Image (cartoon, rainbow, N blue to C red):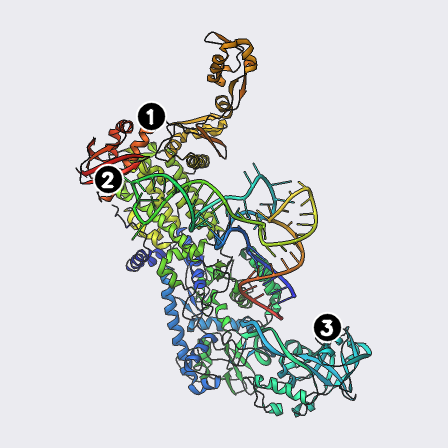
RNA sequence: GGGCCCGUAGCUUAGCCUGGUUGGAGCGCACGGCUGAUAACCGUGAGGUCGGGAGUUCAAAUCUCCUCGGGCCCA
């Protein structure tokens, strides 16, 4: 038995109830259990970082995942839905540091690594729990009680195992290289952790004195004065033309060497009054030229080095064409230095502070020394020019401080060797959309560098490398067990975090003590192993062998360089193949102006805010429907409200038949299409066809992950087909009071349609569909809609019928249009509607005549071929007086009248007509196109329609009767009468003719208004009102009967 | 500076791959209808330099190039 439901769609209430129901009845667990023996689908959740709040983008991400997994579950797959959490790394360290008000690593050490790490752990777990609740409130179904977490020993062992594989395969390397370095966090950071934005920096031109040549200088340019102390070389382009220029300023004369094309630009900046080229040479001619370090007095150590010019291809003809090289502070500089056996002179410590060797600058930070160095150069007359420049500069992704490039010893995975194989592998992956892999990801891989996996931090997976301080040998451990077996300390167990693992020591073959290298992993390496770690590999092998690689992953397009890449890299190292078979790349959420959302810009919208106003289903359906997954999504409240309205319509449509069904005791178990199949009307067959073809289309769209199209076709069905058309057509049938097969047919059809549309919508809007299902479910149904199978059958699809109905709707719409033109309300019938089209169309439309007739409120529907119509309407005989006149003389008028009264049919193909004794021949009239005044013309895609606007007594009487009924109904409503309450009615009409017309419909009025009595003349009753109907005064009184 | 994506009515968008009758919708707006889904529902209408420019073509929202704006990523 159905329950009646509230007239307003109330998502908050519904969602609360549904989520409680799921929890109480363990619906999630039972749903998964139901599919435990089915074909498996291995999905890997990209682990969100545990920062605390989910934002709209994270919500969108999980909603996409949830909808797809729910769909697949309905398609009877056993889905792997273990969620993941990325819980290590700098972002959390930075947050904890902020809370503790720490500024440097030293303070952490003083505070105690153990306490610090424990705080990080506690923080990460708290955040995870908060975010879990937020995801749950979105209705996301995942295995929340058993997520994979990067901080568990089990997970860490998967990371360790992977590194050991890399080591075995010779892909692990330690080396001195230039890396991105964050002086604040005192650690190396990955390319993918560098964020670029505009920054103002110094821009200085410096003169490097040539050895053995008086007053002669190389001119270099830099934005980083602090790198000059590390300068060991100058690079020039071998085939670029350089010039030695004699330049004068303030009476002084000097010689400058720089690229020929840049002379004017640079010397103007330098404030030189005049200059001339002394000689030109190619860059390669300059190679070997010796110069003096400009700050060798300030930095005595610089006197020990031999500074020379070298050629290099990376030099371009910009600024001066001479590039100052400090091997410790630049990638290219480092490479150049390596080629020429230059020292890697690093004068900075981890904090970016000059060490003692840096002489005068010792103890100063980079920031402090920039102006200092510039000033020193100026004092020494070596500064040619200084100004400021705004350029894009890299920053640490979490602390937002500018990074530097610095040579340090780090651990690398030699990914660049695997580039070709990676490119091969990604071709085998199915990308949605295709360009995500074919263009975007490919481009990124082609730029792949070796992966620096070490970080000089605390809160991360400790790198499982133990090193002998004596002989330098290393050991890589792939599991906790392996470590403990080799450990000197006899402990039962150890937590795989710093500082605990750091206390484990191993004996080296040489007899000395091996200690763990202090680094932790780049956090990107954690999530990189997710596809096997989530399967508890390497501890458990079975599931890995059965399921891996992943069937499907989906993340935002920022993950091209992130998780899509890190996973591929780690997997290539470990298994030599891609860890996923298909990837859906989704977009970003932006504000309504297409800008990034951020709290500081004040355009931030949180998922909670949306949920609290419109509910999770609306939010879900909105983000899924409003743009293609791979496009960016501009968040727009108005559109969200539209989606809400659509849900409201859905709710109303669902609710509409319930009271009638309850009244008639129609139970879900009574539903039986077989029984009523002979009573199906054409509109029933049509809506059945529409719902079936919609379900089919949705499934097709889901195959290509076109979630937006899937949703939109459901919405279209609900609003356009179900609400605006079928419900309109079916309404009168539900009012039939007796037991009628026509009504039962309607109930059955409505039941089928509502049920099916709920099923199809269930993956996207899991709450509202559940509550509907709970009300309409049959005894043999599963306990939850989400345990149902996706509707497979589409036996009712009838494309011809759908097309036909489309035409009928066009005709009805056009008729409304015409009614508006002739100012005829729908309440007043029109005499007839003419539909003019080709034979085939008319034949099809024949079956829809009654629909067209009721929906257009036409007394008669006439289907006509084009020439039929033309005979009747467009061509009429019109008398030719020049012929009639001479022949009929004074009878001419009479004859002309006769001709006017004739129709096309009367004269067609006739040689002669004899009417009232007159002989009329074709030359006496012409055939003229005439559209009678009472007809108005409109168009539809297959022809034309005409509305006959003629008013006759029948129409008037019906029109007035309906006007009266309408008024009485209005009064009933104002009296707040029950729908089936009986009344007594009296009417006084101020116009005798109209009263007579209305009286013709006495029975009709009594029926429609449930009036036991209907009296004309004197009005009396509980409720009396005076109305003006088309200018006629009407008094109506009603009383309860 | 490079790669990829996006830019169509006030708003959200379909169409673009595979060029071809007046570029479709929805919301909003204006006007109207319905009144047994009723603080709901339905219709009609007005709104478009298809970001801009050039080219290819008989024909360009659609193909090519350039350019502007936005997003992600890289240097």
First-in-chain label (1 vs 2): 1
First-in-chain label (2 vs 3): 3
Please rate how many residues cluster around mark 2, counting C-alpha atoms within 10 Å: few if below 14, some from 14 to 19, many from 20.
some
The answer to whether residue A373 is visible is: yes
Element at label 2 = strand
Which residue carries the number 1 mark?
Answer: A953
Asked if labels 2 and 1 touch by Cβ distance under 8 angstroms, the answer is: no
* Up-down relation of residue A921 to residue A1016 (above or below): above
* Up-down relation of residue A629 to residue A865 (above or below): below
Element at label 3 = loop
Q: Nearer the viewer, mark 2 or mark 3?
A: 2
Asked if labels 3 and 2 touch by Cβ distance under 8 angstroms, the answer is: no
Disc 3 sits on a residue from what chain? A
Alpha-carbon distance for marks 3 and 1?
95 Å
* Up-down relation of residue A152 to residue A556 (above or below): below
Q: Which residue is pictured at 56% across the width and 65% down the height?
A: A576
Please rate how many residues cluster around mark 3, counting C-alpha atoms within 10 Å: few if below 14, some from 14 to 19, many from 20.
some
Disc 1 sits on a residue from what chain? A
Q: Residue lying farthest right?
A: A279
First-in-chain label (3 vs 1): 3
Q: Nearer the viewer, mark 1 or mark 2?
A: 2
Which residue carries the number 3 mark?
Answer: A317
Task: Residue A7: give its label.
Answer: none
Alpha-carbon distance for marks 1 and 2?
26 Å
Disc 2 sits on a residue from what chain? A
Please rate how many residues cluster around mark 1, counting C-alpha atoms within 10 Å: few if below 14, some from 14 to 19, many from 20.
few
Q: Quadrant of residue A481?
A: bottom left
Task: Residue A1025: give its label.
Answer: 2
Asked if labels 1 and 3 touch by Cβ distance under 8 angstroms, the answer is: no
* Up-down relation of residue A48 to residue B48 (above or below): below
Q: Residue lying farthest left?
A: A1041
């Amino acid at each position: 038995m159905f329950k009646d439901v509230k007239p307003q769609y109330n998502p908050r209430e519904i969602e609360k109830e549904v989520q409680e129901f799921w929890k109480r009845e363990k619906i999630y667990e039972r749903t998964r259990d139901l599919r435990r023996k089915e074909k498996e689908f291995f999905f890997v959740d990209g682990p969100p970082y545990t920062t605390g709040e989910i934002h709209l983008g994270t919500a969108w991400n999980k909603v996409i995942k949830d909808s797809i997994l729910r769909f697949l579950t309905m398609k009877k797959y056993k889905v792997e839905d273990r969620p993941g959490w990325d819980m290590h790394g700098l972002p959390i360290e930075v947050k904890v540091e902020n809370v503790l008000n720490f500024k440097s690593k030293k303070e952490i050490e003083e505070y105690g690594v153990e306490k610090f790490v424990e705080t990080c752990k506690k923080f990460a777990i708290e955040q995870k729990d908060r975010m879990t609740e937020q995801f749950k409130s979105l209705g996301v179904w995942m295995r929340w009680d058993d997520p994979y977490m990067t901080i568990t020993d089990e997970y860490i062992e998967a990371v360790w195992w992977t590194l050991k594989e890399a080591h075995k395969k010779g892909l692990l390397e330690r080396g001195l290289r230039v890396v991105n370095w964050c002086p604040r966090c005192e650690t190396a950071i990955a390319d993918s952790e560098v964020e670029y934005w505009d920054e103002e920096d110094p821009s200085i031109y410096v003169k490097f004195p040539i050895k053995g040549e008086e007053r002669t200088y190389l001119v270099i340019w830099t934005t980083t004065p602090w790198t000059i102390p590390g300068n060991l070389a100058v690079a020039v382009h071998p085939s670029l033309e350089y010039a030695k220029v004699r330049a004068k300023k303030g009476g002084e004369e000097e010689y400058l060497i720089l690229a020929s094309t840049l002379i004017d630009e640079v010397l103007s900046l330098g404030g030189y009054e005049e200059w001339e080229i002394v000689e030109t040479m190619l860059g390669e001619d300059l190679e070997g030229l010796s110069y003096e370090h400009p700050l060798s007095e300030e930095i005595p150590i610089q006197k020990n080095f031999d500074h020379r010019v070298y050629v290099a291809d990376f030099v371009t003809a910009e600024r001066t064409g001479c590039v100052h090289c400090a091997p410790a502070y630049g990638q290219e500089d480092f490479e150049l230095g390596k080629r020429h056996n230059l020292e890697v002179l690093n004068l900075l410590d981890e904090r970016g502070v000059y060490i003692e060797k840096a002489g005068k600058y010792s103890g100063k930070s980079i920031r402090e020394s920039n102006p200092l160095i510039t000033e020193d150069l100026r004092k020494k007359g070596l500064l040619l020019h200084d100004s400021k420049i705004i350029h894009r500069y890299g920053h640490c992704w979490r602390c937002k401080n500018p990074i530097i490039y610095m040579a340090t010893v780090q651990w690398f995975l030699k990914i660049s060797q695997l580039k070709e194989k990676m490119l091969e592998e990604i071709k085998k992956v199915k990308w949605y959309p295709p360009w995500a892999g074919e263009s975007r990801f490919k481009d990124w891989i082609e730029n792949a560098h070796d992966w620096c996996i070490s970080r000089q931090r605390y809160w991360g997976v400790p790198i499982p490398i133990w090193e002998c301080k004596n002989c330098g040998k290393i050991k890589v451990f792939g599991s906790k067990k392996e470590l403990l077996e080799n450990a000197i300390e006899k402990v039962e167990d150890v937590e795989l975090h710093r500082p605990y693992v750091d206390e484990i020591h191993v004996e080296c073959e040489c007899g000395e003590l091996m200690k763990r290298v202090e680094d932790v992993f780049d956090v990107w390496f954690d999530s990189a192993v997710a596809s096997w770690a989530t399967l508890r590999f390497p501890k458990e092998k079975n599931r890995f062998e059965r399921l891996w690689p992943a069937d499907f992953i989906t993340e935002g397009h920022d993950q091209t360089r992130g998780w899509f890449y890190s996973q591929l890299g780690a997997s290539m190292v470990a298994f030599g193949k891609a860890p996923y078979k298909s990837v859906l790349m989704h977009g970003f959420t932006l504000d309504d102006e297409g800008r990034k959302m951020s709290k500081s810009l004040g355009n931030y919208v949180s998922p909670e805010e949306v949920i609290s106003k419109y509910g999770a289903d609306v939010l879900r359906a909105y983000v899924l429907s409003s743009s293609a997954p791979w496009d960016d999504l501009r968040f727009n409240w108005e559109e969200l409200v539209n989606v809400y309205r659509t849900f409201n319509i859905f709710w109303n449509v669902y609710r509409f038949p319930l009271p009638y069904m309850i009244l008639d005791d129609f139970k879900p178990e009574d539903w039986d299409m077989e029984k009523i199949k002979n009573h199906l009307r054409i509109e029933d067959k049509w809506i059945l066809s529409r719902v079936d073809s919609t379900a089919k289309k949705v499934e097709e769209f889901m195959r290509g992950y076109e979630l937006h199209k899937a949703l939109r076709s459901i919405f279209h069905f609900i609003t356009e087909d179900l609400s605006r058309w079928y419900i309109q057509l079916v309404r009168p049938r539900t009012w039939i009071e007796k037991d009628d097969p026509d009504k039962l047919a309607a109930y059955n059809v409505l039941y089928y349609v509502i049920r099916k549309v709920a099923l199809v919508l269930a993956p996207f809007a899991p709450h509202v569909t559940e509550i509907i299902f709970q009300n309409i479910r049959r005894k043999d149904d599963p306990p939850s809609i989400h345990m149902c199978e996706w509707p497979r059958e589409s036996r009712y699809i009838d494309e011809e019928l759908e097309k036909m109905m489309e035409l009928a709707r066009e005709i009805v719409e056009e008729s409304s249009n015409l009614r508006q033109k002739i100012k005829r309300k729908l309440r007043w019938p029109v005499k007839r509607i003419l539909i003019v089209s080709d034979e085939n169309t008319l034949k099809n439309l024949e079956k829809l005549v009654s629909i067209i007739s009721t929906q257009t409120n036409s007394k008669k529907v006439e289907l006509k071929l084009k020439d039929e119509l033309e005979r009747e309407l467009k061509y009429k005989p019109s008398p030719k007086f020049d012929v009639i006149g001479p022949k009929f003389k004074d009878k001419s008028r009479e004859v002309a009248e006769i001709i006017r009264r004739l129709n096309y049919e009367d004269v067609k193909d006739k040689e002669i007509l004899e009417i009232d004794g007159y002989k009329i021949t074709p030359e006496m009239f012409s055939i003229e196109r005439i559209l009678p005044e009472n007809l108005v013309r409109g168009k539809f895609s297959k022809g034309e329609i005409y509305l006959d606007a003629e008013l006759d007594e029948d129409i008037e009487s019906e029109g007035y009767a309906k006007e009266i009924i309408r008024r009485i109904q209005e009064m009933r409503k104002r009296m707040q009468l029950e729908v089936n309450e009986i009344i007594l009615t009296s009417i006084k009409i101020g116009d005798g003719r109209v009263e007579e017309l209305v009286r013709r419909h006495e029975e009709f009025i009594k029926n429609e208004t449930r009036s036991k009595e209907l009296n004309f003349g004197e009005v009396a009753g509980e409720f009396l009102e005076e109305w003006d109907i088309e200018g006629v005064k009407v008094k109506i009184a009603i009383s309860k009967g």
